[in-house]
Amino acid sequence: MRAATSSMSQAVEGLPSKSMTRHLPTAARLLMGLVFFVFGLNGFLNFIPAPSNQPEGAMAFGMAMMKTGYLFPLLKGTELLVGVLLLANRFVPLALALIAPVIVNIFMFHAFLAPAGIAIALILLALELSLAWSFRAAYRPMLAMRATPRA
């Protein structure tokens, strides 16, 4: 009874009842979801203009992805889907597993071809790693050294 009264008085006074760090995974999920939703949608609607001062290697890589006819739409469709899943808080561990290779590619692209954008790549990598750590229990069965199929 005393604990309930104490937490009720804290809530009434506007004091946080727990640490703010409990909100970090939610903030990371929403930020990452927003980034991938916007940039995935931009891949189809082109509402954010492409930077004109890209290095030659970065331009060649982007053009090669577009010329395949399937890779760029697949990449942007994956980003859009993952963005929606993260924003909706649905299938988050699956969304993180789907977007992990894309984030590695974003990081490598900026590390080797367009270093000017490395900050956003590092932020996305940090968000991915922190969220993967938060959902580590969901990945435990997938990372088992030996697994047996169920009938």
Image (cartoon, rainbow, N blue to C red):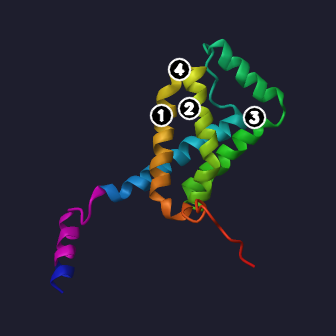
Q: Find the distance from the CA under tag 2 to the CA under tag 3.
A: 17 Å
In this figure, which residue is indicated by the disc labeled 2? 107
User: Is residue 13 left or right of 120 when viewed as pictured?
Assistant: left
Q: Which residue is mark 3?
A: 72
* Circle 3 SS class: helix
Badge 3 density bin: few <14, some 14–19, many ≥20, Cα 10 Å: some
Q: Badge 1 is on which residue? A: 122
**Does dot 4 land on a helix, a strand or a loop?**
helix
Q: Count how many numbered circles sit on residues in the image.
A: 4
Residue 145 as seen in the image, left or right of residue 125? right
Question: Which residue is depicted at the point 18% across and 80% down?
Answer: 3
Residue drawn 71% across and 23% down?
61
The numbered mark, 4 or 3, whose residue comes first in the sequence reads 3
Residue span colored magenta:
6-20
- If you read the primary sequence from the N terminus, does the residue marked by circle 1 or circle 4 appear first? 4
Residue at 65 percent across and 67 percent down: it is 147
Label located before the other in sequence (2 or 4): 2
**Sooner in the amino-acid sequence: mark 2 or mark 1:** 2
Query: Principal SS element in the magenta part?
Result: helix
Q: Quadrant of the C terminus?
A: bottom right
Residue under label 4: 115
Q: Residue furthest bottom?
A: 1
The x, y position of residue 13, in whole percent, is 17, 66
Q: Position of residue 104 (x, y in %)?
A: 59, 37
Horizontal side, residue 38 vs residue 59: left or right: left
Report the amino acid beneath label 1. Leu
Q: Amino acid at mark 3?
A: Phe
